[in-house]
Amino acid sequence: MAANMIVGIGLLLASIYIGRELGNAYRRRERFYLDIVNFCALLESEIGLFQNKLLDILERSIAHKDFNVVLLEVKLGLSERNQIDNVELVCRLESLKFLNSSEQEHLIEFLCGLGRLDVAEQIIWIRRHRQAYEQKLNECRSENKAKGGMCLKMGVIAGCLGFILVI
């Protein structure tokens, strides 16, 4: 009886953990796109109003965990090689499992296009991508709202069901 209780509690906790982690994937994706939109707004104001250099803007950029990894790679490429390295950027983006290949390609296109145009064209480039990322952010918000909480609830329900069946 005690062994069944321990197995049941383990099953309950494991199910809750899995449900929580599945829900976190939706929150991480939403946070990632929020960081991109904020970064685009920063770029637009810094380049358009102050005409600061891209590397200076990147040095002052603040992002959360996932997008910060991408920004660090861009900073590294610009400071060491004076260009953004597509291969290294692709490797960094592949580690972000919540982005599909077309989203990765779109982000690489955006980041590699930075600093290659004159100021007016660069602002247009940033605005166009910012609009696309805002649209994606809205999709991620609704997806997180619909599915993020449901994953945790399903984990709790599955864990309780497993606990009852074991006992």
Image: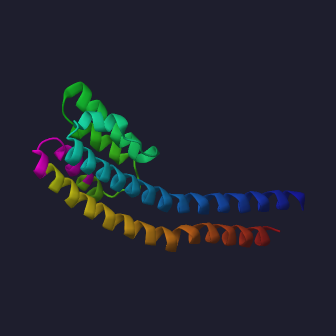
The residue drawn where x is 53% and y is 58% is 24
Q: Quadrant of residue 102?
A: bottom left
Range of the magenta residues? 107-121
The residue at 29%/58% (across/down) is 103
Tell me which corner region of the image, top left, top right, bottom left or bottom right, holds residue 166. Answer: bottom right
Residue 119 belongs to magenta span: yes
Q: Is residue 73 left or right of residue 83?
A: right
Q: Residue at x 22, y 58 (%)?
A: 127
Residue occupying the far top of the picture: 80
State which quarter of the image contains the N terminus.
bottom right
Q: Is residue 112 found left or right of 161 in the rendered image?
A: left
| Viewer-closest of 90 and 52 | 52
On the image, the x and y values in percent for residue 88 come to 28, 37
Residue furthest right as drawn = 1
Q: Position of residue 81 (x, y in %)?
A: 20, 27
Q: Chief secondary structure of the magenta span?
A: helix
